Structures are given as structure tokens and as C-alpha cells.
Image: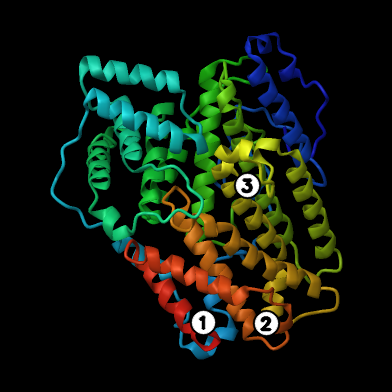
Amino acid sequence: MSDSVPIQSEPAERTNPQKRRFDPASLAILKRLDELEILLQTKTNDPSPLALGDFPSTSPSGPSGQLSSPGTAERNPRKLPFITVETVLEWPVFDDCGFPRHFHLLNSLEENTHTRGPHISVDLGLHETDRLLRAFFDHVHIFNPTLEEEEVEEYVNTIRLNGIGWDAISCLLLLIYAHGSIATPFVKNGPGLSPDLFGSSKSFLQAEAYFSAAQKRMGPLLCTSGVIEAQCFFLAGVYLMSTLRPVAAWRMFVQALACCQGFSVQQRNESYESEPSTKERIYWTCFKSELELRLELNVSQTGILDLSYPTLFPSPPERLKSKDEATWYFYLAEIALRRLKNRILDSLYRHDMASPEFNIEHAIFDFEEQTDAWLSSLPETLALGVVNSDTEQYEPFRFILSGHLLDCQETMYWHFVVEGIHGRVGNGSENFVQRGLKVCVDRIQQNRTGFYHRHHGTWLMLRSCTRSALVLLAAARCVKLVGFLPLGWKESVLDVTKMLDFWRDESGDVSEMLIVLQNLLDPWI
């Protein structure tokens, strides 16, 4: 279904007799799918519904007969709305700082390497692999539930019987063990393990051994496009993100998405079999991970940015366990925000802002209403801004959703912040400028509890918080905007420098961002 066409209270696919095979927890998830879909249909102009299971091309120039989701392929080229650290550093307000034109912090990323100690062989002992498998499912898989735990356990038993091989299943298990070696639980305001200690730790060296063994098995996977192959490349990308190697991670996500493009899935109203459900989930997960990183890396240099996305939501697995309900609510809520952000980008930046036919203020009001509706749709376990000791175990989910929500809000108000920094604060736009600057402080304060936690989104957090700090410093350099700066903005910028200082030895671009931020902050402290 598209985002714009209202769905019936009982869609055909929901009334399929095979639906009875789902347990109550699964039915609750399906109900949440419908509620989120209704939310996404408001105030949009997307085309008619497309069948779930038809995976659209992410290329702007796919064949005419191929199903595709709302994007920018058919629209006129326009300036890309890149919201990055590099874009901010090119603003005229920083001209006197001596930054070179087309300043690119990402140039140093290709050189990122971890200091490795002596070679460690992979440990496939029964006790060790069980521990790593549990750590993976408890601390990694919950954020991207693309695997079936029962199936993975079958893979483990097969490997224990036949030994590690050179096939896709062996590669997948090695990647799972690599994740399990470095995965840690999310602890609010946890001190974290410093990069220098992490790089020489036994856990990291063991993880690298598993990852290296998995890499040796990836070559043959390039010629196939099955579910397990896609899962392998995706998990490889997540591992590289967790060790702050985003360029290499993006390549893995691209390859994972390429595997997904080969899927041929039955219509959902014809079957609820597990394989189509698994394909839907891995496709969605690969799509959102690749797009998120592509936008941050500013990889696309063409005049058109493809923001097309898959239709509908992925189906939950059959026999969903009650303990996994919160995981699925989180997963669907995260997808809903990804789609909302795409629509904000597509709507606000496909128009000529000076055109009398386009009212950006009205568009933002509409998106604010959709954001509020999304917030009200969250179940109690994931409700943001609510302190409840009974749901403390779901804090990692709320942490991530809060960050994605701020991404949407930043995108909504970005145009007005940029106009304000460039001295073009018009009547009626002051409120939006203030909201945009407040988002910058909110982002830093909200992320503070996870500044030192290593996970899939650590590098993206470093970048987004640095961008927010730079926007605040840019506003502080503008006489007309000083009065719009939120309380505590200096302290927030200083907190970002502390965060960057912690991670500076892990990645060259982090060290460069720290130097830039310290130099800009110096006159204010």
C-alpha cells in the first residue's frame, strides 16, 4: 500500500484464512502495522497501492514496467539537500576560519585502520559460541530482527556436526560470532571502553579473527542473491559500522541491497510463508541502512537524489514470541520515521522555495502533525520522555527512536536555519529558526547518555552531534541569531568536544572534527 491511499479497516491480506496461523502476539503486530500505515497515509500525494513482495529498484532509471515507490526519479533535478558537517563548514559565516573550500573530513576515512595485535585463531568451542550467539541476539539482533533464532540454532547444529565450511551459512555464523565478541548492553551514561583499550582487547582481536574468516567466504556470495547472502553482507556492514569504518560498511550495505534486488516474492495475500517474510525484513533493513549512510557520506553527486522506498512494512515472523513484541514495535516505528524523513526531504526540496504555489510553512505544519501522530501511536513500552522503571529494559529502543525523531525535525527546519545563518530571517520565520536551533541542543542532550557506547550508529551519532554543535556556533557568529540560541548551548557544544575526544583515536575524521570544533569554540570559553 502506498502512503496516500486510505486502507480499509480489514484489508484483503489481513482477512486471509492463513492469518489464523498467527498467535496473538503476531496478530498484535499486524494490527500495529495497519495503524502505522494509516498514519503514513495522511496528507501525502503518493500513487496507488503497490503489492508487498514486489521490491522496487532503488535506481532512478529502472525499466518502465518495474514497480517503484514514491521517489524523485520522475521529477526535475534540483539542488540536493545534503545536511552534513561538510555543508555547514562551507557556510560564509566560517569564511574567516581558513577552512579550505569543499572541506571534506571524509577523505581520511579510507585510511582508517585498527591496530591489531598478534593473530588469534577463531574459537568454535561449544561454550564460547553459545555465549557469542546469546550476546548477538541480546545486543545486536534486537535492533534489526532479520534472522529467525530457531533457524540460526539449526545452522549452529549443522556446523557442529559437519564442521565450518566455505558456504554462506558458515559465513553468516562467523559474522554473528564477530558481533557477539564486541557486543555490550546499553547502559545510560556508561563510561565505555576507550578506543585504544578496545583496539588491543582480546574481545576485539577475537572479533577481527571471526570477521577475517567470514571475509574469506564472501567472494562466492557475490555471484548469488539469496536471503542468507544478503544477511551476510548486511551483518558485515553493521560490524564495520560498529568499528567506525563507514565507507567499507556502505559498500557492504550496497552489496546486501543488490542481493535483495534479485528476490522474487509471492504476494502477501497469497501466502504468509516465512521465506517471503524474511525477504521483506532483510530488504527493508538493507534499504534503510544503505540510504542513511549514503546521505551522510554524500555519495550521490548527481542532480537527482533517489529517495524511493519499499512499499508497506515487512511482515513479522510467524509464531512471534511475546518477549519479541517490543522489538517489533521498535522496528516498525523506526521504519515509519525513515519513511517520514524521506517524505520531508522529497516534499520540501523538490519545490522552488520562492514559488508562490508552494507554502513551506503549511508543509511543515503538516509534517509536525504527522510527527505528533507517530508519537501518540507508540506503545507504552516505547513511549518517549516517559520514565517508567517497568520498561527500563527498552531504553536502547527509546534512545534510537529519539535520535531518528530529531533527524526528522532537523530536516523540517533546516531550510529556515540555513536562511537565518545567511542573514535572511524573514517575518514569520523566526519561530522555525528557533525550533531548528533547539533541535541542535536537544540532539546533543538526548545523545549524551550514549556518547560512549559502541554500536551500529556510533559513527552517525558522532557526525550528527558535531553538525548540531557547528550549527550552534554558526548562529553564535550571527548578530541577528544570538537571541535565538537556546539556554545551555555552550555547555552542549563542550559536551560534543568531550565525546569526540573519547573517540578521536578510532577514526581520522573524528580527530579532525574535534580540532575544528575546539578552534571554533575557543572564543566562547
- Lower position in the chain sequence, tag 1 or tag 2: 2
The kind of secondary structure element at disc 3 is helix
Mark 2 residue type? His
In this image, 333 relative to 140: left or right?
A: right
In the depicted structure, whether residue 292 falls above or below residue 334: below
Q: Quadrant of residue 255?
A: top left
Mark 1 residue type? Leu
In this image, 150 relative to 423: left or right?
A: left
Which residue is labeled 3 in the image?
338
Q: From mark 1 to mark 2, how far is it between C-alphas? A: 20 Å
Q: Give the label, 1 or 2, closer to the camera.
A: 1
Which residue is labeled 2 in the image?
422
Q: Which of 334 and 142 is in front in this view?
A: 142
Residue under the image location 74 percent in, 72 percent down: 433
- Can residue 458 be seen here? The reply is yes
Picture coordinates of residue 93, whole percent (x, y):
59, 85
Picture coordinates of residue 521, whole percent (x, y):
51, 82
Tag shown at residue 521? 1
- Lower position in the chain sequence, tag 1 or tag 3: 3
Residue under the image location 69 percent in, 46 percent down: 386
Is the N terminus in the top left, top right, bottom left or bottom right quadrant? top right
Picture coordinates of residue 129, whole percent (x, y):
28, 28
Disc 1 to disc 3: CB gap under 8 Å: no
Q: Which of 263 and 452 is in front in this view?
A: 452
The kind of secondary structure element at disc 2 is loop
- Lower position in the chain sequence, tag 2 or tag 3: 3
